[in-house]
Amino acid sequence: MGFAFTNLLELEDLARAKVPRPSFDYIAGGAEDEVSLRRNREAFTKWALRPRVLVDVSRRDTSTSVLGQRVSMPILVAPTAFHGLVHPEGEVATARGAAAAGTVMVVSAIATRELEEVAKAVAGPCWFQLYVWRDREVTAQLVKRAARAGYGAICLTVDTPLLGRREKDERNAFTLPPGLSIANVRPAGLDGVPASERGSAFAKYVAELLDPAVTWKDIAWLRSLTSLPIVLKGIMTAEDATLAVEHRVDGIIVSNHGGRQLDSTVGTLDALPDIVAAVQGRVEVFMDGGVRRGTDVLKALALGAKAVLIGRSALWGLALGGADGVRRVLEHLRGELELAMALTGRAALAQVDRSLVQRV
């Protein structure tokens, strides 16, 4: 029967009892004072729904398309690192759970399973999230491997020139347990995250091996490597959204890295309207950060997001129930979205627009 839950907000406490403390803190924690982490949730309370009544909602449809790919819901699995921390099948199980729910997983480059193994586990395409290593050939090989393995898009994370100060990880001297590594860069010998007596070993890995000199000109370099759609993850301003359009990307994800990078940003839902206005429909806009309820999803869609992504909730589902736990989390959130659509008088996502929400 697995684990019992009433809503996604309960999952963190359920997982806390099962996941070892350093791994739990790595997933749950944010940067510094965790202001950005809190604001992601608080942003949803600033918008109220405006329900319309006496509408036929006897049939509801939550399906949509993302970068031309049909999905059963406007909810994707965000790229998160090290799924092997919470389940022995790691990213393979997460991908199976997402596929069973009819949606897309964005697979992290910093995964504990190789990207080819994850792709083989599911029938439909995943997206591949990318960091840029100082050794550009390592990065180029990852992009080419993702294309060969059948991934549907390359998602470049742009908000991590260095790792944010995650103080829980520093206190825990977080590192990967024995038997886990960054599987995708094993051929280059860069898969190990050495133990550290003080501070976060992963922060040291990022500082030493990932490239803090990446700029907008590197989008053209990335484009030269692949014909796959390119999505930029970590856009938080209208100015950068405009630059993303000018550099001919295919999508952007409004994200503050789940509150794990720069502290004291606005919540992502608060950043969304200006970014949507700036891109003027020229690229697809997605959003992550703090999504825990179907009404959260509906508000993001009303403010112009094509879809949202969930990170921690999917990991808690993985920890508690493997692939089926991930599926249950996604389907629960889809059920809440469908109910919220019905109660606001919207039978299909095409009927969701700005008139659905007002600032309070």
Image (cartoon, rainbow, N blue to C red):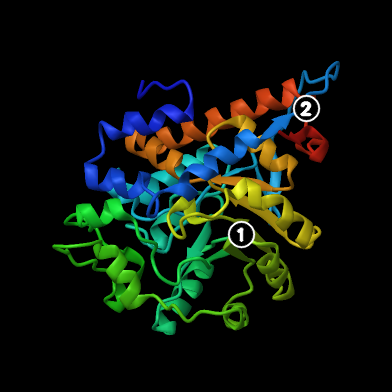
344 or 128, which lies in front?
A: 344
Q: Is residue 291 left or right of residue 201?
A: right
Work out whether residue 99 can be spotted: yes
Return the x and y of residue 177 as percentages of the image width and height: 19, 54
Tag 2: amino acid:
Arg
Identified at 64% across, 60% down, the residue is 252
Element carrying mark 1: loop
Q: Earlier in the sequence, mark 1 or mark 2?
A: 2
Q: Is residue 200 above or below residue 101?
A: below
Instruction: Measure the C-alpha gap from mark 1 to mark 2.
Output: 26 Å
Image-based side of 237 in relation to 30, left or right: right
Taking 255 as reference, is 229 above or below it? below
**Which dot marks residue 322?**
none
Outermost residue, top direction? 54
Where in the figure is residue 338, as x and y percent of width and height? 67, 27
Name above or below for residue 69 compared with residue 302.
below
Categorize mark 2 by other alpha carbons within 10 Å: few (<14), some (14-19), many (20+): some
Residue underneath mark 1: 236
Type of amino acid under label 1: Met
Relative to 33, does residue 332 appear above or below in the rendering? above
Q: Which residue is mark 2?
A: 50
Q: Secondary structure at mark 2?
A: loop
- Which of the 4 quarters of the picture holds residue 353? top right
